[in-house]
Image: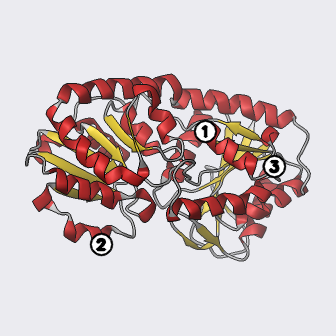
Amino acid sequence: MHIAWIGKKSPPCGNVTYSREITNALLEGGYRVSFLHFAQDEPGDGAQITDLQEVSLPFLYKSQVYTIPSPRSSKVLAAALGSLKPDLVHASLTLSPLDFVLPEICEALAVPLVATFHPPFSHKHRNLTSGTQHFMYQLYAPFLANYDAVIVFSQVQKELLSRLGVPDTQLVVIPNGVDTQKYSPGISSFKHELKAQQIFVYQGRISIEKNVESLLKAWRLANLPNDCKLVIVGDGALITSLMPAYGPEHNILWMGAIADEQRRIEILRGADVFVLPSFVEGLSLSLLEAMGCGLACLATDAGADGEVLEGGAGIVLNPQRAKSEIQTLLPVLAQQPEMIDALGRKARSRVIERYSLDRNIDSLEKFYAQVATRPKVLLR
């Protein structure tokens, strides 16, 4: 089967990781994959198709969150799909206006179209950030109904889209998955590198919805020993305002964005506890990666993350009380390494049981076979 994958290759974000992991696994499974993604506009009017079947779509702006395509990107995309003649188009939605015209393009080409819908959400706790994300779901729902099928990461996300009018028959739950052999406990020199006894780590964007400042305030107030370090991996709009107030004098180390995956794995393997204080989430790949590496995990009940950690696989936080709860838990964990070890074992077992990349790909292959034989959805 030939899959035309529409996704992101930069800048680093969950969508990029998702697209890379899935397309690599499909290639290894014998699928033919063409990767269409936004890249710097090239001279000429046609798509740039390489020997690796990559297609460059012109854009005006892109970020970790959304993309603004160039005016001719839809024509470039339609021409590329017409030339490639895939059996199925899978769009890992990039939050771009192109998402809304994809059903029309694929209907004209008579090719099945499926989407993975990533935007974060919070189903229990409402605030300004979650309200903004809910608006994104309201905006997209009428257009998602024109896709042949939509992949979401959890039952609560499916229920949200269903309430907004996307037919249940077009929604399928296939959770994110991680390579549990690659993301696994192992030897790391990172702790020795930092001369630390314990390492707590956050990996992700430094942005409002990630609520990183609550973690930083809690860390400073917890007043842990000097051999306990908080490592922040990532970049984002708030980094320049937060770094001056929370620095090495508080045993907080800012690593910036790290493109080298092996370095990120080394950091996780050398760490003890992973903390994710987000107001909204989808299903965090960073959380699953940390769990795969055997870290004790604290995450807010946002998106599907609470579902991932339920039943003792981690500690679930209330997004509205994240600072006070983290401040209370940090000294408890620091003083009880046996609790950290037990939570880390449970976290890895949960990932192997429910969130491995192998399980994800098995479900995706069965899903592709079903979609290929379904009647095409007619545009509304």
Crowding around mark 3 (Cα neighbors within 10 Å: few <14, some 14 to 19, many 20+) is some
Name the element at disc 1: loop
- Tell how many labels: 3
Disc 1 marks which residue?
A: 154
Residue depicted at x 22% and y 43%: 330
Name the element at disc 3: loop
Disc 3 marks which residue?
A: 85
Disc 2 marks which residue?
A: 240
Residue type at tag 1: Ser
Residue type at tag 3: Lys
For the residues marked 2 and 1, what is the alpha-carbon distance in whole angstroms? Answer: 34 Å
For the residues marked 3 and 1, what is the alpha-carbon distance in whole angstroms? Answer: 31 Å
Which of the 4 quarters of the picture holds residue 131? bottom right
Is 179 in front, or is 146? 146
Residue depicted at x 36% and y 62%: 235
Quarter in which the N terminus is drawn? top right
Q: Which mark is residue 253?
A: none
